[in-house]
Image (cartoon, rainbow, N blue to C red):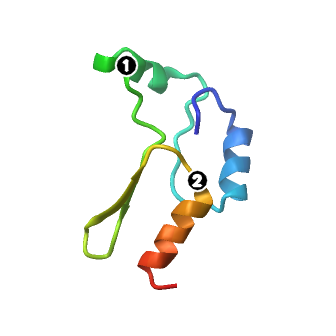
Amino acid sequence: MNSGDTAEEVETFLRRNSVELPSLLDSTGTVYQSYEQSEGGFAPYPFQVLIDQQGRIQAVEHQYDAGAMRGRIDALLGR
């Protein structure tokens, strides 16, 4: 989620993209701002790490593309 999103926007996004994972709601931007003030000003999200059944990292993404991630997961599961 982007900082500043409302709970309704988050719920709509999760439902539309069939995301069933816990998601951060940072409607005030407090969490995001804490990273902006850290060394380098780097906010670590969006950030997804896809790990296979053997514990190997298969993908690291800094943008969320639900279709692409679902495709990678399906490929790893042999679907």
| Residue behind mark 2 | 65
Indicate the position of residue 55 as horizontal and vertical percent values. 25, 69
At x 55%, y 67%, the residue is 70
Quarter residue 39 falls in: top left
Secondary element at image label 1: helix
Question: Which mark identifies residue 23?
Answer: none
Secondary structure under tag 2 reads loop
**Res. 19 visible in picture:** no
The residue identified by callout 1 is: 41
Amino acid type for the residue under numbered disc 2: Asp
**What is the quadrant of residue 41 in the picture?**
top left
Q: Residue at x 74, y 49 (%)?
A: 12
Can the viewer see residue 78 in this picture?
Answer: yes
Position of residue 54 in the picture relative to residue 33 (left or right): left
Question: Please, what is the three-letter code of the amino acid marked with disc 1?
Answer: Gly
Name the residue at the bottom extreme.
78
Q: Residues within 10 Å of mark 1 (few under 14, many from 20)?
A: few
Packing grade of label 2 (10 A; few <14, some 14-19, many >=20) is: few
Q: Position of residue 42 (x, y in %)?
A: 37, 25
